[in-house]
Image (cartoon, helix red, strand yellow):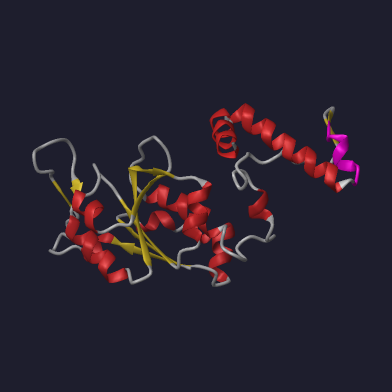
Amino acid sequence: MQIDVITLFPTMFEGPLTESMVKRAREKKIVTIRIHALRDYAEGKHQVTDDRPFGGGPGMLMKPEPIFRAVEAIAGKNSHIILLSPKGKTLNQKKLAQLSRKKHLVFVTGHYEGVDARVEERLINEEISIGDYVLTNGALPAMVVIDGVVRLLPGALGHEESANHESFSHGDLEYPQYTRPAEFRGMKVPEILFSGHHAEIEKWRKAQSKLKTKKVRPDLAKQKKSREK
């Protein structure tokens, strides 16, 4: 997979995309990630990327010209162009799985009061939000989406089954897990995990997942129950 990011703050991506699982995936050529400075596509001596909104109002808007130039220079026939925006559809595991099957993702990260509406209308394929709250710009949301997508690519994780057992993979939160010591400060690991009966262990884990989902995320449990009817 190839991922390109268009941003006003390219150095923000240096840490998160050069560590841990994403770093290993890049080293193994599972994914290629390129960061592009939006100002490189702006004209004029001062490389201006924002201006006041028509009709008045607070703040500044990102101009369409630099964004269009950047996307047109980077994107191709198989590119899927995403704008990170509070107005977008809220990210979930299903969406990450869909994106992981794309050949080329291009992320446009907003700033200020947002972007010129013509970018939304004519240039992008979809808008994505990572939650109902406001951040300074779209760089952090882009990192979140990239991390979630890359870990689903074949070979990105150390164990191929890891992604299949994570929270949300099957609609529930992940079951509780334990490691050594078997007893710590009076807290004991459930006996079923020492039984060696894999079918019973799997049954216990599924029940625990449902119980945890119902307790921690009742909204998620309700949605899943509705889908299963």
Residue at 33 percent across and 71 percent down: it is 76
Is 194 part of what is drawn in magenta? yes
Q: Farthest residue in the right direction?
A: 195
Q: Is residue 54 left or right of residue 191?
A: left
Question: For residue 187, which quarter of the picture?
Answer: top right
Question: For residue 204, which quarter of the picture?
Answer: top right
Residue at 18 percent across and 44 percent down: it is 60
Is 203 part of what is drawn in magenta? no
In the displayed structure, would residue 54 be above or below residue 16? above
Q: Nearer the viewer, residue 136 or 74?
A: 74
**Location of residue 226 in the rendering, given as x and y in whole percent from the top left corner:** 55, 34
**Location of residue 173 in the rendering, given as x and y in whole percent from the top left corner:** 63, 39
Q: Nearer the viewer, residue 143 or 164?
A: 164
**Location of residue 28 in the rendering, given as x and y in whole percent from the top left corner:** 58, 71
Q: Is residue 15 visible?
A: no
**Location of residue 84 in the rendering, given as x and y in whole percent from the top left corner:** 35, 49
Residues rendered magenta in the picture: 188-196
